[in-house]
Image (cartoon, rainbow, N blue to C red):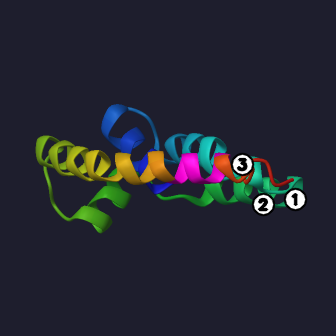
Amino acid sequence: MIHSLLKGLKDNPKESLSTIGRKAYNESLAPGHSFMLRSAVRLIFFTVPGREHFIQKTFGDLDHKAFSSLVGQVVDLLEPLVAYLRKYYKDRSLTNLE
């Protein structure tokens, strides 16, 4: 989810953190969660701070260019790990745990 969240922040500079977080959750963790847990998480996304507040608290006072560069590097570093984990879970039939 962290990979998807960071990628969304980098690739969609106009989108809210709540929307990006919801998309990241839906594509990464939601498929393995029960209806009740998915519903609770949906509610949590209504309490997420603003995008700029999150970026400032998490990454400090970076301008947009520096933030995009840093997050791009992190996303690129995570790509092989994410690919490995997806294959690992798929090979062991762990992708649909409901």
Q: Which residue is mark 3?
A: 95
Is residue 80 visible in the rendered image? The answer is: yes
User: What's drawn in magenta, residue-wise?
Assistant: 85-90
Amino acid carrying label 3: it is: Thr
Is residue 26 toward the left or the right of residue 24 in the image?
right
Q: Secondary structure at mark 2?
A: helix
Q: Residue at x 55, y 40 (%)?
A: 19
Amino acid carrying label 1: it is: Met
In the rendered view, tell whether residue 71 sits above or below residue 47: above
Do the residues bearing badges 1 and 2 touch, measured as CB atoms within 8 Å?
yes
Q: Which residue is mark 2?
A: 40
Is residue 98 toward the left or the right of residue 57 in the image?
right
Q: Provide the major secondary structure of the magenta segment.
A: helix
Q: Which residue is mark 1?
A: 36
Q: Secondary structure at mark 3?
A: loop
Q: Secondary structure at mark 1?
A: helix
Callout 1: 10 Å neighbours few (<14), some, many (20+)? few
29 or 10: nearer the eye? 29
Residue 41 spot, x, y in % from top left: 71, 58
Look at discs 3 and 1 and give the one toward the viewer: 3
Do the residues bearing badges 3 and 1 touch, measured as CB atoms within 8 Å?
no
The residue furthest front is: 91
Cα distance between the residues tagged 1 and 2: 6 Å
Q: Residue at x 61, y 48 (%)?
A: 28
Sequence-wise first label, 3 or 2: 2
Cα distance between the residues tagged 3 and 2: 21 Å
Q: Residue at x 78, y 60 (%)?
A: 40
